[in-house]
Image (cartoon, helix red, strand yellow):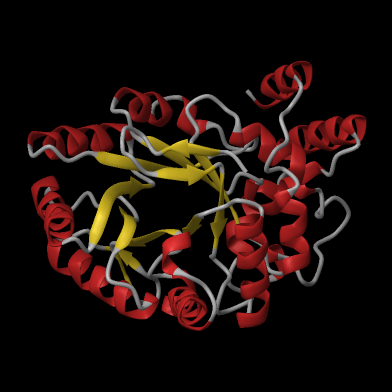
Amino acid sequence: MEKRRLGRTGLMVSTLGLGTLTWGRDTDFEQASQQLQMFLDAGGNLIDTAATYGEGESEKLIGNLLEEKFSRDDLVICSKAGVRPGDPPSVDASRANLLRGLDQSLERLGVSYLDVWFVHHYDPFVRVEETLTALEMALRSGRARYVGVSNYPAWAMAELAVLLGQDRYEVAAVQGEYSLLNRQVEDEILPASTHFDSGFIAWSPLGRGVLTGKYQTSVPPDSRAASQHLQGFVAPYLSKEYEPITQAVLAGAEGLEWEPLKLALAWVKDAPGVTSALTGARSAGQFAAVLKAADAHVPHQIRVALDEVSA
């Protein structure tokens, strides 16, 4: 699997990242262990989690894997903080909540530092200077090697990048949703991350699973759309307005004799400005299909056709 430099840092990350949204809840220790081994064997190194995934269970599972089977040195570990638990959870990018979240993540993971620590969501009620000091404290203490932002508007990311730059730090990476079903980051986020030399990590490159084609006739009972935790997450892309894009992916995949997810994932992985695309799977069998996209490249004519139908 190819590795790319994360922005202007010295950190090299795999073009596919292992997402762990379902770990510890829908994906158990054995299935997660198989996935991580397959990922490492394929040349991957970037694993992404968050304090809120499974209410901390995802990080705990990763910690158990590191304790029992895998080496910390083989992985680039990313996690996120800035969401306060509750029903519903609330965004809180205050210094107190961010640093508390960082310490709790490190404890659950059983590690002394994160390779990249992200502010999970933009918080309009907290001054940027307060969020900034939390990031700088994490960097200076060594608890985070690099910092980034996730789900931020471009102007807020730019403001933070300028302020961090005054102290010779950088927004090393930006995370945002990016797929053929959602190309909004092309408007401002991708140009901003390119301008500030920040790596861009795409989440949900398979359109929250819809671009696998599994929802064409019904909702499989073991799918995310049938999960009480993720049903609302998938539902927006099951509307009729997205059907032409999904059908175009299915047609293109059939012509290439590829699986639809391979085409959809390869399109994002090699899109201009993208450093890595995060992909998660409930089972090792599903993840095996994901890894087929690691070295796949979309032919030019098909990329142009998909660009047009999804524009």
Quadrant hosting residue 215: bottom right
Tell whether 247 sits left or right of 102. Answer: right
Quadrant hosting residue 156: top left
Nearest the eye: 183 or 13: 13
In the rendered image, the vertical position of residue 307 relative to residue 212, given as above or below: above
Q: Provide residue 224's location: percent of width, then percent of height.
A: 68, 65
> Quarter holding the C terminus?
top right
In the rendered image, the vertical position of residue 127 relative to residue 153, given as above or below: below
Count of numbered tags: 0
Residue drawn at 67 percent across, 43 percent down? 294
Q: Provide residue 78's location: percent of width, then percent of height.
A: 40, 58
Quadrant hosting residue 25: bottom right
Residue drawn at 44 percent across, 78 percent down? 63
> Quarter holding the N terminus?
top right
Tell whether 167 sits left or right of 13. Answer: left
Q: Provide residue 75's location: percent of width, then percent of height.
A: 46, 60
Q: Provide residue 6's location: percent of width, then percent of height.
A: 39, 39
